[in-house]
Image: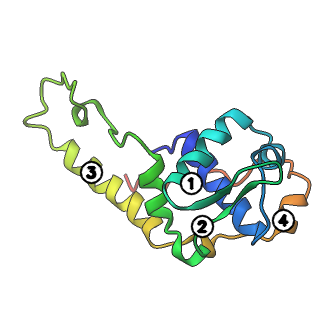
Amino acid sequence: MKLTTFTDYALRVLLYAGAAGDRLVTIEETARIYGISQTHLMKVVNLLTKAGYLRGVRGRSGGFTLARRPEEINLGAVIRTTETDFSLVECFTPANQCLISNRCRLPRLLNQALAAFITTFDAYTLAEIMLSEQDFALPAPAIAGPAATVPKSSD
């Protein structure tokens, strides 16, 4: 399972807005902090505002802030809001052309794995992963972040 860049940016926006507390942050500032496109971030912020996660303030001194307390922002709900397609394989799509779909046992396993993935995020709120505003001022580490680890097969 891989989250889209849109969801990645949505989680980053929420982290940064949460770290800022009541201070309004701008799309320009957020884009600069993360080194990402303002245009793309504008779409992310608009969706998060419409979904009620952010509160936007228009105007020259405008920006955005969290619309809810971090304890009230469930990460699983955010992912459901931002991800548009959970079709892991062709047989989950309306255009499915797979010849064995009606007999295949793989979709059940894939659905189970997807449910476990989302359930993990359902167990956490923004408050549990928050950073301080000072964390965003630190120089970027030499390595982008921890590498994903996949358990080894017991074969």
The residue tagged 2 is 67
Identify the mark nearer the N-term, 1 or 3.
1
Give residue 30's position: percent from left, percent from top. 77, 49
* Residue density around tag 4, few if under 14, some if 14–19, many if 20 or more, within 10 Å: few
Give residue 111's position: percent from left, percent from top. 27, 51
The residue tagged 3 is 111
Is residue 77 found left or right of 34 in the rendered image? left
- Amino acid type shown at disc 4: Asp
Mark nearer the viewer, 2 or 4: 2
Mark nearer the viewer, 1 or 3: 1
Q: Nearer the viewer, residue 133 or 1?
A: 133
Q: CA distance from mark 1 to mark 3?
A: 30 Å
- Amino acid type shown at disc 2: Ala
The residue tagged 1 is 49
The residue at the point 8 percent across, 37 percent down is 103
Which quadrant is home to the N terminus? top left
The residue tagged 4 is 135
* Image quarter of residue 104: top left
Q: Is residue 98 above or below residue 65?
A: above
